[in-house]
Amino acid sequence: MRLSRYFLPVLKETPAEAQIASHRLMLRAGMIKQSAAGIYSWLPLGFKVLKKIENIVHEEQQRAGHIPMLMPTLQSADLWRESGRYDDYGEEMLRITDRHGRDMLYGPTNEELITDIFRSYVGSYKDLPLTLYHIQWKFRDEIRPRFGVMRGREFYMKDGYNFDLTKEDALHAYNRHLVSYLRSYERMGLQAIPMRADGGPIGGDYTHEFLVLAETGESEVFYDSEVTDLTFGDREIDYDNVEQCQGVLEEFTSRYARTDETHEEALFNEVPEERRRTARGIEVGQIFYFGTKYSEAMNATVVNDKQERVPVHMGSHGIGVSRLLGAIIEASHDDKGIIWPEGVTPFHVGIVNLKQGDDEADAACEALYKSLTALGLDPLYDDRKERAGGKFATMDLIGLPWRITVGPRGLKNGVVELTCRKTGESEELSPELAVQKVA
Ligand code: ATP
Ligand code: MG
Ligand code: MG
Ligand code: MG
């Protein structure tokens, strides 16, 4: 992309309404624009990162054997009356009446809708196990929308639902989700720690939240520092292997790690003192096994091998796709701007032409642009007639991992400058080598 043809409305001033770094930086980098409280337009740069994150989630869900689909944002109230949640959900639910006086709602989540789909088509244990998911906009009329996309009212979420014959099978689905979430967050350059969460009115031990440690997080968290040493890495995983998935769950959840909702001081005190940590965290996902709560209420049953009709065991599993942009930036920025991890960066590399209009510099930039593109990389070429300082500031703000700076003086010696956004280190090298290093 050539910056002269792109739409990147960078702000010079720091927006007064933004209280935390990620919100400020997303506004300044021209990624989002608020349309109403907690509702945002995704400008091209923000949209690009959103799609990158969405893509990683899709890939990892499908790797785990989960099946993508798409449900609508608007739902009929009837199904929610059936489950009993139409009244229980409270004021976070945006209720709408259509022209015929029918009660509708903008879905805050999709258990009812997916359970209805399931019961309409599936009747035999032979069709199980089944895990369906979608990535769709949700609406929750949060009392205090704030921190930009972190706590929006309209937000983008992946929600997946497993249907299994037995509790045991459903717990395997739970474990698969845990593993696939660990992989997903790591690909985004994030450490998200699974922490024992509150089962709410349904109770039970089978729910974990994934938290990214950050000072601006809304949850208070308590953990054994050993949990921050764990990484999933590139180990092979067979999602059908029950023991292997269970092993990962045990490895990642056996140490003390809880949010304020489930924190138990006495248990925490059993962790050696030097490893006890109290911090703040951002919830970027949650997995949940809830058994037959919805299947019983909504009569989602299958016939088992003894010809008995039994309610299916279910769980639901969410990732806050749009919140993740905020979480990633909170975890990775400096006073100049965002520092995108490679896995989610909107462009791989920026090219800065120090003297736009200089034949040699222009030609060198064009050549770089071509070779990077040919390698399947996505460069952003700042081809505007602007001061170098302004160009550097924009590149630092939007946080691409690499910058290649091209100017007449360097070209005389056959070199360009390659700068790493994260370390700030620069080196002079030939254009060919610079391309190789970035690729
Ligand atoms: P929170 O505790 O932050 O209100 P939640 O527990 O209500 O979140 P879930 O129902 O678990 O949210 O939804 C799954 C994921 O969706 C959350 O882990 C979070 O990442 C994301 N999410 C929830 N509410 C919002 C919101 N208002 N804005 C952006 N993302 C959200
Ligand atoms: Mg909530
Ligand atoms: Mg929560
Ligand atoms: Mg939650």
Image (cartoon, helix red, strand yellow):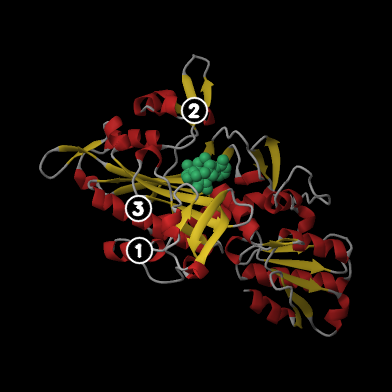
Tag 1, which secondary structure? helix
Q: In the shown orientation, is residue 8 left or right of residue 88?
A: right
Q: Residue at label 2?
A: 90
Q: Amino acid at mark 2?
A: Gly
Picture quarter with the N terminus: bottom right
Q: Residue at label 3?
A: 174
x, y percent for residue 208: 42, 52
N-terminal-most mark, 2 or 1: 2
Tag 3, which secondary structure? helix
Q: Is residue 81 visible in the rendered structure shown here?
A: yes
Q: Residue at label 1?
A: 250
Indicate yes or no: mark 3 CB to ligand 1 under 8 Å.
no
Tag 2, which secondary structure? helix
Q: Out of 130 and 230, give the one closest to the viewer.
A: 230
The image quarter in which residue 39 lies: top right
Distance (Cα) linking label 3 and label 2: 28 Å
Q: Is residue 156 visible in the rendered structure shown here?
A: no
